Amino acid sequence: MDFYYLKFSPDTTTGIADFHSHKNSELSLHPNPSTGDFDITAKPGEHLREIQILNLEGICMKRFTYTTENNAHLHFDEKGFYLLKTETDLGVYVNRVLVVY
């Protein structure tokens, strides 16, 4: 199980910046906010390996595994803020997502 440490100070907003570990990679995630359906597309030649939906405590709520796809459609219908951790063959991305009704 993966955990993420978030540190806040009095002069910091409570937003969480998107993160990716490979600067030459691009990941398309839409729509965001969403009613629970998300489309994720990696750039051509980049393949998805695993996608995890994490709550803000870093606990994995749902996991998807892929082999050769460069795009995916996800469904997650629990309302709230989440971190979407996407592993590709070129790096790892962490995006914040909002599920609304």
Image (cartoon, rainbow, N blue to C red):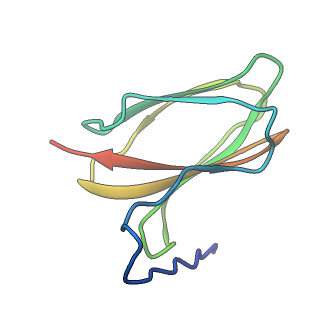
- The structure residue drawn at horizontal position 77% and vertical position 16%, both measured from the top left corner, is 44
Residue 52 vs 11, above or below: the answer is above
| Left or right placement of residue 18 versus residue 91 in this view | left
| Left or right placement of residue 66 versus residue 18 in this view | right
Quarter of the figure that contains the N terminus: bottom right
Who is closer to the viewer here, 32 or 9?
A: 9
- The structure residue drawn at horizontal position 20% and vertical position 44%, both measured from the top left corner, is 100
Residue 12 vs 16, above or below: the answer is below
Who is closer to the viewer here, 76 or 34?
A: 34
Q: Position of residue 5 (x, y in %)?
A: 57, 79
How many numbered discs, if any?
A: 0
Q: Position of residue 13 (x, y in %)?
A: 37, 67
Who is closer to the viewer here, 36 or 8?
A: 8
Q: Position of residue 31 (x, y in %)?
A: 37, 28
Q: Position of residue 36 (x, y in %)?
A: 30, 39
Residue farthest toward the top in the current orientation of the protein: 44
- The structure residue drawn at horizontal position 45% and vertical position 76%, both measured from the top left corner, is 57
- The structure residue drawn at horizontal position 24% and vertical position 36%, both measured from the top left corner, is 35
Quarter of the figure that contains the C terminus: top left
Asked which quadrant contains residue 46, the reply is top right
Asked which quadrant contains residue 23, the reply is top right
Residue farthest toward the left in the current orientation of the protein: 101
